[in-house]
Each structure stands twice: as structure tokens, then as C-alpha cells.
Image (spheres, rainbow, N blue to C red):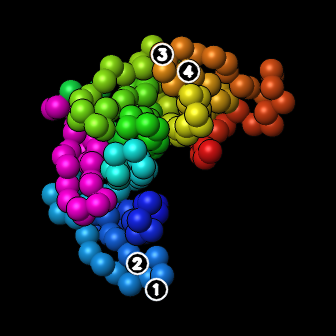
Amino acid sequence: IQDQDGWVWVGTSNAGILRFRNDNGAYIGSVGGLGSDSVISMAYDEYTETLVVGHPENGVSLVNTSTISLIGTYDTGDGLDSDLVVDVATRYGIAYLATPDSGLMRIDLAGLQILSSWQSLGADSLEAAPVAIDGDTVYFGLPGFGVMILDRINGDIVDLLTVGNSGLPDNDVLSLYT
């Protein structure tokens, strides 16, 4: 992930997140205190200058990229519905945390508050849960079921794209990017 200042952030399986220069690739340092040194997903929110880091068993960590410091960590003990965050996306100060077992969780990055989850999507017990955002639209990949399209503002399901109704060639959606 590259932030608005040009720094490159790399997530690792055993060493947390690392920061590198974008001009020569020099290693700058890391951030301590993460929920886990195992990183499974990351997203950068330009609005709050926050790097959102998803962990496979320890929820999510929030990092201020301007000060290179930990803002905080969140897990089920803090009110998240799941500690397994397999994908993250951000838009206008809101982090969207995709889980294979508890739908789509959200955190207000400016107010540092856990918002209500979008669990009534019928999207539980998934092998993967990719998420991407474009404008006011959230795309939630459902392996075996296609792509669910949600309204970013109210969480309403706008559409479900499948092989049968959209020309999608495969319902096994494992990754998304906007």
C-alpha cells in the first residue's frame, strides 16, 4: 500500500507492517504494538491518514501514517463481531472489515468507534470475503455466490451479480479491487 506521502507499507506474515521509501526502496522501520505480527490485509484511508491492518486472529490495528504510530487495536473484546479480518477497504473515514464468519464490520476512523455490522447479508461461513469500494458503492465478494453490491451509506443490498443474471463468468469471487 502507498500512502498520500508516498511511503510504501508492506504487510508480512510474521513481522507486522514495514515502511519503505518509494524512491529507492530503503527500509525505514516498522510500527510496534499491533494486534498481531501476522497481517492478512491492509487499506489506506486518505481522509484520516490511517492505515487499517487486518489480522487473521486478532481483529484490526489502526496506524497513523503521518506520525508512524499505532492509533489502536480492535478485536472481539472491544466489540468487533469477529477477530478474523480477511479483507479491508476504506472510504471517507470509514473502514469496512470483511470476515468470512460475521459479514461486514465497520469502524469510524475519525471518531474511533465501532459501527453496527452489516450481518444480515446472508454472507456467513465463507471461505473468503473480499471487499472493495467505489464512491457510494460497496462490492462484497461471495465465493460461490458472485458479488453483492451494497449502498455505502445505508447498507442496503442494491444487487447481487451472479453467473445467472449478469454475465459474470464465475461465481467464485476471491478478490476485488476498484
- Check whether the beta carbons of the residues at disc 3 and disc 2 lie within 8 A of each other: no
Q: Name the element at disc 4.
A: strand
- Magenta extent: 54-78
- If you read the primary sequence from the N terminus, does the residue marked by circle 2 or circle 4 appear first? 2
Query: Gap in Å between the C-alphas at discs 4 and 3?
Result: 6 Å
Q: Amino acid at mark 1?
A: Asn
Q: Position of residue 161 (x, y in %)?
A: 71, 25
Q: Name the element at disc 1.
A: loop
- Residue sitting at 34 percent across and 45 percent down? 48
| Side of 146 relative to 80 (left or right) | right
- Check whether the beta carbons of the residues at disc 1 and disc 2 lie within 8 A of each other: yes
Q: Amino acid at mark 4?
A: Asp
Residue 118 position by quadrant? top left
Q: Amino acid at mark 3?
A: Asn
- Residue sitting at 36 percent across and 22 percent down? 117
- Give me the disc on residue 151: 4
The residue pinned by badge 2 equals 21
The residue pinned by badge 1 equals 24
Q: Position of residue 97 (x, y in %)?
A: 40, 36
Query: Gap in Å between the C-alphas at discs 1 and 2?
Result: 6 Å
